[in-house]
Amino acid sequence: MRVLLCGGAGYIGTHVALAFADRGDTVGILDDFSSGLRTNVAPTSLLFEGSIMDQKILSETLAQGWDVVVHLAAFKAAGESMLDPAKYARNNISGSLNLIQACIAHGVEKFILSSSAAVYGEPEYLPIDEQHPTRPENYYGYTKLAIEENLAWFARLKGLKYVSLRYFNAAGYDENGRMTGLERNPANLIPVVMEVASGLREKIEIFGDDYPTEDGTGVRDYVHVTDLAVAHVQAAQHLQEGNDSLVVNLGSEHGLSVRQILDSARKITGREIPEEIVARRPGDPAKLVASSAYAKQTLGWRATKSDVDSIIASTWRVYEANARKIG
C-alpha cells in the first residue's frame, strides 16, 4: 500500500509512519516542519516538504499516486485556538478542504482523518461513545467537527471514503526507542511531569484535588500513541477492503488520574517531582473516559499498550536521553 501522511513529521504522525513501515507499506510524508521534527522522520520515508495551504505542493505530491491519504496536519492547541481562531480556520478548515479537493482531483478515494474527542465538549454521560452530542467548547474542537462534516458531504457527493479517528489523550513514545526527538511545545500533563522530572521545570501544578474521583484529582483517558498508530493501519485496511466510511473513538476505556500518573512517574524515574495543589481550572470536568466499543467492532482495534507504566516508561526514556544530551 502507498500511504501519504500529511503532517507525518509530528508526534503522532511519526508513530503512524512507523506502523505502516513495519508492515512493508510505502510511506510518504508531507510536512512544513512548523511543528514536526526531521530527526523523527524515518530515512525510508518519501519526504515532501510543504504545507496543506499550498495547492501547488499538494497537487505535485498527490500526483505521485497514493492508495490512502492520512490527514494529521492540523494545529491542535485548544487554548491558542480561542485566542487566534483565524489561524485555526485557515489551516484546519481551509487547509483540509485544499487536501480533500486535491485527493479528489488526483483520484485518491480513501482518506483517514486525525480527529479529536474535543468535538464532544462537556460530557453528558460516561463513557463517551460516538452517539454523544457534539458541542465543542473550544475553536480547535469546532474545526475538527467542521472537517468531519465536510468529509461526510464529499463522501456523499464525490464518492470519497473516509475514517475519522477521534483520539482521546495521546501519550507515550515508541517502545522500541525509534523516536529520539521530543514533541515541540507540549501542554499536556505527562510531558509537563517529564519536564519536572528532567529538571526543566520546578514543579507540577495539580489543578484541584477535591474532585469526586477516587483520589480527588481529575481523570482522563490516555491512549498510547503506538495504539493510535495501529488504528490508522487498521482504518486503511478497512477502506482498502471496500468497507463504508466510519467515525470511531480511540481511547483506552479506563481513566488515569493525575495522582496515578504522578505516582507512576516517581516510581519509574526515581525523581521526587515536586507538586503544588492549585485551584481548579474553569470548565475542567472531573472525569473523561471513552467507549471504544465501535472501534473494536468495526476495525478490530484494541488499546494494548495504554497502561500507565508503559506510557510513562516509554516517555521517560526519550526525556531522559534528551536531558543527557543537554547536560
Image: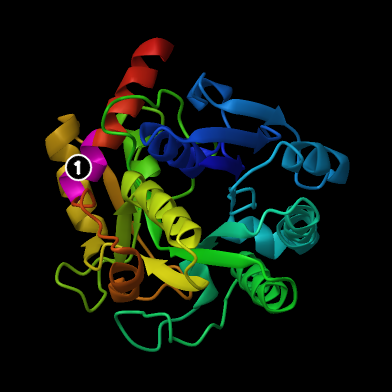
Type of amino acid at the residue the image marks with label 1: Ser
Farthest right residue? 56
On screen, residue 131 versus residue 311, left or right, reads: right
Q: Residue visible at 19% across and 35% down?
A: 272
Residue ID for mark 1: 310
Residue 81, picture quadrant: bottom right
Q: Is residue 309 magenta?
A: yes
Please determine whether, in this image, residue 124 is positioned above or below residue 310: below
Q: Residue visible at 41% across and 82% down?
A: 123
Q: Nearer the viewer, residue 187 or 209?
A: 187
Q: Is residue 273 magenta?
A: no
Residue 281 placement (x, y as % from top left): 45, 68
Asked whether residue 280 appears in the rendered view, the answer is no
Residue 156 placement (x, y as % from top left): 68, 79
Please determine whether, in this image, residue 138 is positioned above or below residue 114: below
Q: State which quarter of the image contains the C terminus.
A: top left
Pointer 1: residues within 10 angstroms few (<14), some, or many (20+)? some
Residue 324 placement (x, y as % from top left): 34, 13
Task: Give the SS element for disc 1.
Answer: helix
Residue 87, picture quadrant: bottom right
Q: Which residues are magenta?
A: 308-313
Please determine whether, in this image, residue 149 is positioned above or below residue 11: below
Q: Which scheme is used to colour this image of the protein?
A: rainbow
Q: Nearer the viewer, residue 187 or 205?
A: 187
Residue 152 placement (x, y as % from top left): 64, 76
Q: Residue visible at 70% across and 77% down?
A: 153
Magenta part mainly helix, strand or loop?
helix
